Image (cartoon, helix red, strand yellow):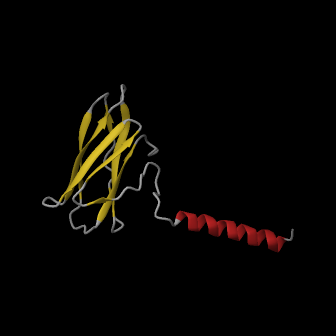
Amino acid sequence: MTRHTLATRAAILALVAVLAACTDSPTEPGESGTRWNAGETATDSRRGVDLTISYNATTHRFDGSVTNTNASAVTDVRVEIHLSNGTELGPTPRVSLGADETKSVTLDASGQNFNWYSVHVELGSSSS
């Protein structure tokens, strides 16, 4: 193969990689891609940590909880919300959850206009 052919193939592979990254699929580990309407309660689960959260149009914030359904503690739990307008709320501060422990989650959405949102739980210091 000539040097020109190799360069062309490399450019095509790079373009394919860029196009694959530009889909509507989730972009971070753990994102399900499920879209929830503002009036719906969202749920997500990741390795035994369950999230339930909903938008309160009166207070302009998301309120919910994360629950560790595991028999042992889970560390560095946080929550993110992605709005249809491109805004990311969070992540929340990292918390540890003991076995069967539940903690409240609140994210402020003041000033945000959106049609839908998606949520996900992150675990560990590397957001895995």
Furthest-top residue in this view: 71
Q: Quadrant of the N terminus?
A: bottom right
Q: Position of residue 61 (x, y in %)?
A: 20, 57
Query: Image point 22% across, 67% down: which residue?
Result: 111
The residue at the point 20 percent across, 63 percent down is: 110
* Residue 89 versus residue 11 in the image, above or below: above
User: Residue 44 location in percent, x, y?
Assistant: 35, 46
Q: What's the residue at 23%, 52% (across, down)?
A: 54
Query: Residue 118 location in percent, x, y?
Result: 34, 57
Q: Residue shown at 31%/29% (left/top)?
A: 98
Q: Is residue 60 left or right of residue 7?
A: left
Residue placed furthest toward the right: 1
Q: Percent x, y for residue 29?
A: 47, 50
Q: How many marks?
A: 0
Q: Give the answer, above or below, for where 46 lies relative to 85.
A: above
Image: 16 above or below 52: below
Where, by quadrant of the figure, is residue 50 drawn? top left
